[in-house]
Amino acid sequence: MIFEKVAEMLADYKGIDVSTIAPESTFADLELDSLDVADLVMQIEDALGVTAQKNFLPLQDGDVPATYADTAALNAWTGFAPATSVRDGVGRFVAWYREYYKV
């Protein structure tokens, strides 16, 4: 259940189909750079009121030092443009999670 919600959040953030995200997907597979990951972690921390324990490592095999995406063509083709910020989406997810699991 948690994976599905996180996958939906990542799909919305990246503007991709949720079915392309698998439990074994890496951030590199999803073309998330280190700033995207750091922003996502900070937003989850803020929403939960906790500080994540982080273990920063050097780049690993398969890591991509930088990626860039332009969704203008997708927007022109489909008319879709994400309207929910990651911060708002994380806040809504955490609120839902706390209500649903009564935590």
Image (tube, helix red, strand yellow):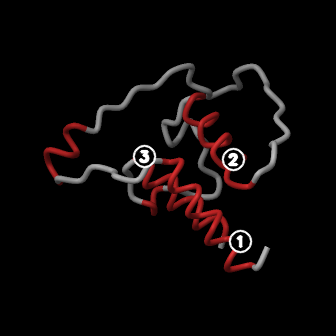
x then y, percent, for residue 54: 82, 35
Q: Nearer the viewer, mark 3 or mark 1?
A: 1
Q: Earlier in the sequence, mark 3 or mark 1?
A: 3
Three-letter code for the amino acid on which mark 2 is drawn? Asp
Q: Residues within 10 Å of mark 1 (few under 14, many from 20)?
A: few
At horizontal 50% and vertical 62% (from top left) the residue drawn is 8
- Give the mark, 3 or 2, whose residue is nearer the N terminus: 3
Residue denoted by label 1: 98
Residue plotted at (52% across, 36% down): 32
User: Which amino acid lies under the numbered mark 1 shown in the image of this protein?
Assistant: Arg
User: Measured along the vertical axis of the image, is residue 45 above or below residue 37?
Assistant: below
Q: Residue at x 43, y 55 (%)?
A: 12
- The residue shown at (40%, 53%) is 84
Say which residue label 2 marks. 46
Q: Nearer the viewer, residue 86 or 29?
A: 86
Disc 3 from disc 1: Cα separation: 25 Å
Does 22 sit left or right of 74 as displayed? right
Helix, strand or loop for disc 2: helix
Horizontal and vertical percent position of residue 51: 81, 42
| Quarter occupied by residue 53 | top right
Q: Is residue 48 above or below residue 35?
A: below
- Residue 6, quarter of the rendered image: bottom right
Dividing the picture into quadrants, the one containing residue 59 is top right
In-front residue for pair 16/24: 16
> Which numbered mark, 3 or 2, is in the foreground of this view?
2
Q: Quadrant of the N terminus?
A: bottom right
Left or right, residue 84 beside residue 49:
left
Q: In terms of secondary structure, where does tag 1 sit?
A: helix
Kind of residue sitting beneath label 3? Lys
Residue at label 3? 14
Labels 3 and 2 touching (C-beta < 8 A): no
Q: Choose between 27 and 52: the one closer to the eye.
A: 52
